[in-house]
Each structure stands twice: as C-alpha cells, then as structure tokens.
Image (cartoon, helix red, strand yellow):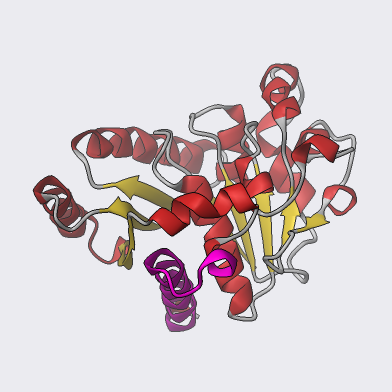
Amino acid sequence: MKILAITNQKGGVGKTTTCVNLAASLSAAKRRVLLVDLDPQGNATTGSGVDKSALAYTIYHVLLGEKKLAEVKVRSGAGEFDIIPANRELAGAEVELVNELARETRLKTAMAGLADEYDYVLIDCPPALNLVTVNALTAAHAVMIPMQCEYFALEGLSDLVNTIKKVRAYLNPTLEIEGLLRTLFDPRNMLAQQVSAQLESHFGKKVYSTVIPRNIRLAEAPSYGLPVMFHDRPSKGAQAYLALAREMIKREKANG
C-alpha cells in the first residue's frame, strides 16, 4: 500500500482536482483506492459525488478518536473508489487537537491495519501548512506536489520542502517527495515553459513527465459530482490523469 499526501500550501493549483481524478484513474486501472479528504472545504468529497451536508460522520470524528476509518468510509458516487469524507466540521479539529496527546499522529494511527485493503491511499490536504497537513505528512509514505508553472510557485515550493524536511526529522524519517506534477499548464505561456524547465533541471526525475493541461472539462466535472473521466473521457484533462495513473504504476513496478 502506498500512502500519498497531495499537498501544496498555495491554493488553486489543482490539488483536489488531482486527488479526485487520480483516484478515479487508478481505480480504472484496477487498483484499490482510498481517498482521504482532509480539507474543511470538502471539495474532494463533493467532487466524488458525496453529499457532504448529509454526512453523520467525517474525518473530523476520526482525528478526534471518536470513530474508526471503517465507520466513516463511503463509496464515491461514480468513481469506484472509497472516500473518507470531510466537511466544515474539520475546521474545528485544528483547535481541538492542540492540547491532545500524539496530535500529529492521529491519522497515522487510524490508518494502521489498512495495508491489505488498498493499493493507494491519496490524501487531499488543505492549502495550509497546519496541524491537519502535518497529520497527513506524518501518515504518508511520500508527497505529491501539484503546482502551476508560474513565478511564485517556486517560492512556495521551497517553504513546502522545508516543512517536509522538518517532518522527516521529527515525525516521519522515511517521508520523501514522490513527484512534482505540473498542473493548469498552458504551453503557449513562455513563463510556464521557463518554470517547467527550471523544475526539470532542479528536481530531475522527480518531475512527472505527464503534464495536466488547462481544460474546461476538468473545471466543469466537479459541478456534476463526477471525476472528469465520467464527465468527458476523451477530453484532454481526462486523458492526462489516465496517463498520470499509468506513469505512477510504471514507476511502482520499476521500483518494486
């Protein structure tokens, strides 16, 4: 089982889009997938076809030790993967966990024993480097960083790399960067080309060769509560995430 935290403290880089569509694409490749929504906005929950307002229990209750993952888990509407949902309640977890024992390892503890059930666990992190994100980084084997190829992206990336180093030093010594994913990419933009080239020269093979383009179908799909492959499979966005899933599986086999 591979646990991937999908994170970037910069908002609007396609984190949730990546979580939902990668989960659907990996499950289409016959992999068993669990998506954990750790963002109080709950967009991965609704984007997977789950009504977040009708939920009795969410990841909030798991982090506070009130429920087990199995009691909270639901099936995604169309994507053929499982999801641990979230809603606005999760915003309170930050404050409530501050004085709790082992507050950074709540998610890791909850995930113990999942290894036989899934091939991939994808964690959608909030756009902040807070206690909830630290829980994700402590539980994960590796980090996927979706990022736009723009000027400020590199600045934010160095902050995130420093956080990963701290988590590795104090909480999770085996945590590594799995890969950097270029999202919302417009090849006609010269700056995007330059930043992309910088990423490749600095991070080498850590940069996925799959690039996620700007695509209207990707933007539309969440309003239907569907991963894009069920909204418009031939679209460039859907094909890009299917290609990313294939690239990840190929990497796993090569490292395996």
Foreground residue among 64 and 86: 86
Is residue 16 shown in magenta? Answer: no
Tell me where residue 2 sits by quadrant.
Answer: bottom right
Q: Quadrant of residue 126?
A: top right
Which percent across, then down, holds residue 171? Answer: 57, 40
In the image, taking residue 203 as reference, residue 122 lies left or right, namely right
Where in the figure is residue 229, as x and y percent of width and height? Answer: 54, 69
Residue for point 47% across, 39% down: 169
Position of 228 with respect to 158 (left or right) is: right
Residue 4 seen in this snapshot = no
Viewer-side residue, 105 vs 8: 8
Number of callouts in the render?
A: 0
The answer to whether 228 is drawn above or below residue 164 in the figure is below
- Residue interval drawn in magenta: 229-254
Q: Main secondary structure of the magenta part?
A: helix
Left or right of residue 162, residue 42 in this image: right
Classify residue 88 by image quadrant.
top right
Counting from the top left corner in percent of width and height, residue 51 is at 77, 44
Residue at 48% across / 76% down in the picture?
252
Residue 101 locus on image (x, y percent): 76, 26
The quarter of the rendered structure image containing the N terminus is bottom right
Residue drawn at the location 39% of the way across and 43% of the way down = 13
